[in-house]
Amino acid sequence: MLSLVLPSWAWAVFTVIAAGAQTARNAMQSDLVSRVGTQGATYVRFLFGLPFALLFLGIAHLALSEPVPTPSLATLLWAAMGALAQTLATGLMLLAMRERSFVVTIAFTKTEPVIVALLSIVLLKEVPSILTMVAIGVATAGVLLMSWPKSSPSGERSGMRAALIGLASGACFGASATSYRGAIIELGAGSSFIMTASLTMVLGLIIQCVAILAWLVLQDRPLLMALLKNWRPSLFAGFMGALASQFWFLGFAITSAARVRTLALVEVLFAQIVSRRIFKERMSRAELGGMALIVVGVILLLNG
């Protein structure tokens, strides 16, 4: 078995790579909504991501000369909870994108670190440091500042529906991250972090794909045909989704989910680049101020 020694900041590198890949995947999924609808675009990342996840697991097995561990019932239960929450979170995120801009929708979902921190304390007994909690608070304040619905001339706030959907998506993403971290911890004894991360991702995707395919075959065969018809853009979205998940899970395997998902707020910055270059969307002063707070929160986190 190949022994790997990682620098202390490796989790941060994994997280930034994952955030970049996820931004690309989100943009691809947003574009697919017009072709296969919100539900179909949600399914794409799972159905077309599984083959790449299996490939990553195979590469890890061969490169490390390490057997694939046998998951326990507890591991499977954690993975199932993570898979269900992730599927729901993705659907809610894409639904919110139909209500408001791409970059602000991503910001809504990034209230997730608070949920992750709370669930990690309750479920995994992982208590963040004081500086990490401050970083989570500052970065989340930045997210709320940049995503708070704007007032209309009548005094009513527009986009409240998108805000609520986005916040619900963030809560589900938080539950998913915590559950997958739980699965990795259960699986971790005697295996490398790469193998536990890769296998946990495969388990989650298998659960999701079985459920999705069963639903499509029984209830919505036209959508299944539409997904197969749009296999080329779906394949790229699936690859980017699997690549993002691989690095998220590598991060979860070596540090707490709260730290990983707080640093993941850099995805908001990546989303802004995508928004300006592809969707031609502009940022308000409040949104720019929110981004500044996110950057401060990330700096605190990395020094924690």
Image: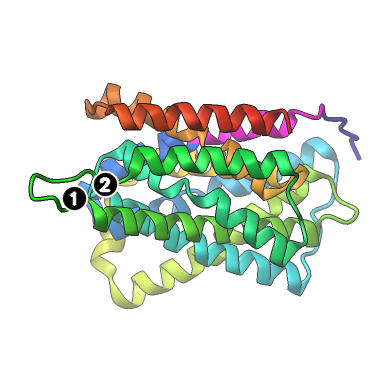
Q: Secondary structure at mark 1?
A: loop
Taken as a whole, is the magenta stretch helix, strand or loop? Answer: helix
The disc placed on residue 149 is 2
The image quarter containing residue 188 is: bottom right
- Which residue is at the far top? 277
Q: Amino acid at mark 1?
A: Ser
Q: Quadrant of the N terminus?
A: top right
- Which residue is at the far front? 155
Q: Is residue 14 magenta?
A: yes
The disc placed on residue 158 is 1
Residue 246 at x, y percent in the picture:
62, 42
The image quarter containing residue 187 is: bottom right
Residue 135 seen from this side? yes
Nearest to the observer: residue 287 or residue 155: 155
Q: Residues within 10 Å of mark 2 (few under 14, many from 20)?
A: some
State which region is magenta.
7-21
Q: What colouring method underlies this structural image?
A: rainbow
Q: Is residue 240 left or right of residue 98?
A: right
Residue 272 at x, y percent in the picture:
36, 28
Picture layout, residue 180 above or below residue 207: above
The disc placed on residue 101 is none
At 54% from the left and 44% from the top, the residue drawn is 242
Q: Amino acid at mark 2?
A: Pro
At 39% from the left and 52% from the top, the residue drawn is 44
- Count the marks: 2
- Which residue is at the far bottom? 218
Q: Is residue 175 magenta?
A: no
Q: Residues within 10 Å of mark 1 (few under 14, many from 20)?
A: some
Badge 2 vs badge 1, beta-carbon distance below 8 Å: yes
